[in-house]
Image (tube, grey):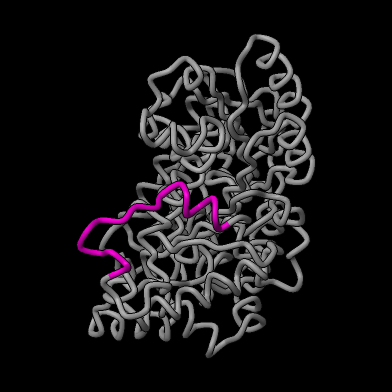
Amino acid sequence: MQMSHPRVFGLFCAAPLPVAAFADLAAAFLNQSTDAWKAGPAGTHVEMRLLRWINDLIGFGPRAFGVLTSGGGVANTLALKMARDRALGTRGARAMGTAGSAARRLRVYASEESHFSIRRSLDLLGLGERALVLVPADRNRKMRVGALERRLERDRSLGLRPMAVVATAGTTSTGNIDPIRPIAIAARAVGAHFHVDAAYGGALLFSSRHRHLIDGLESADTVTIDPHKWLFQPFSLGALFARDGALLRRAFETEPDYLRKDLEAEPGRLDFYHYTLEGSRPFRGLKLYLTLQILGREGLGRLVDGTMEVARSLERLVRSDPRFEVCGAEVELATVCFRFLPRWARRLPPSGRRAPATRRRLNLAQTAIQHEVERRGYAWFPTLVLDGEVFFRFGIFNYRTREEDVAGVLRHIGRVAADRRL
């Protein structure tokens, strides 16, 4: 699979910018580990500057800090670890774990469209998957704020304690954004940690045209962003940003004997192992740092905007062609979900396509088309299931993809369907 090909519409596998790929090569030759300063002085300095700059971009204050991670799943786990320690008391939680009754009452609230890493994090943190409360989403796949408020009120009346509320800025399936500001208000009202999983949508921080879609990001306590998703960086590069860097440090700080500060000439130097669960870790930040040196914020933002334009073009083509049908959610980011309608399905009203037998037949048609397109090698795109119906999921995460590419794939899908007599 050649991820840089303009007709690969895959699972957040972006075409990497050449400068970022070459930076990874340089970092590998340098081979500094940015866990302790003395193992990676240059790497530590570059990553510290990068983190502080992006914190400013989010709108966090001077106390903010963060850490680069392997991806959004790890960043989400770090954020929920901070929330757990805040709820139970950092010393108590780290020393005694989650065996007490107070931990059993903790709850985390996220949309039913949230990433699976939220559930997995609760398992890893000892709270169990039962601690996750999935809040219903509306027709646009956004969290229903009213439903969140009612569930928070009900759970508190039952003696449960809201530990964290998670908003998603760019869902994995359809790329939709939860209403960040209203969710922040609801979280603040019950004293819960507010985390925004912007692993996908955080790239809009660099866009001058679409930055408003993630307004309210600065109201979060922590934010996850994955530059390897939509900022065209090679794997792996995620990040967690914390409004209060001291809280992040308290959640992970440790001091093994072989890394004691009193053994160093300058004991005040920054060690990233105090801010994350990783020990030895690669110099991840150089690729994004050099990308910004070459392109700047505006240049990188223009690449993001270009993929948005191609996604909008795809949406227009699909909506104007009776052979295709978009899913119910609005297109907000660079993801478009739609399906092919065979002739027999086009003759049915939308309500008729939801009958169980018809739905099964339509679903089989989508998977047959996807499999055949993949076998022929002209393009690649995944399928997903939304409310029991199968759709193609086109993610425009390649800055090399043009409008003619998506138009060509639609024509190719039509040819495949005709060949298979769908």
Q: Which residues fall within the magenta stretch?
A: 245-262
Q: Nearer the viewer, residue 318 or 261?
A: 261
Drawn side of residue 198 relative to residue 286, left or right: right
Outermost residue to the top: 158
Answer yes or no: is residue 403 visible. Answer: no
Is 390 in the magenta? no
Image point (48%, 46%), residue name: 76
Residue 191 visible to the viewer: yes
Q: Position of residue 217 (x, y in %)?
A: 70, 55
Q: Quadrant of residue 215?
A: bottom right
Depth order, front residue of 60/256: 256
248 over 104 or under it: above or below: below
Provide residue 67's location: percent of width, then percent of height: 46, 62
The residue positioned farthest toward the front in the image shown: 262
Q: Is residue 9 above or below residue 301?
A: above
Quadrant of the image for the N terminus? bottom left
Q: Count numbered badges in the picture.
A: 0
Counting from the top left corner in percent of width and height, residue 331 is at 69, 51
Query: Does 408 sit left or right of 5 as displayed?
Result: right
Residue drawn at x 76%, y 70% as measured from the top left: 209
Q: Determine the main secondary structure of the stretch shown in magenta.
A: helix
| Furthest residue toward bottom | 294
Residue 248 point in image, percent of width and height: 50, 52
Q: Is 257 colored magenta in this rendering?
A: yes
Rendered view: 372 above or below 5:
above
- Left-right relation of 140 to 43: right
Residue at 25% in and 56% down: 256
Which residue occupies 46% across, 51% down? 75
Viewer-closest of 103 and 406: 103
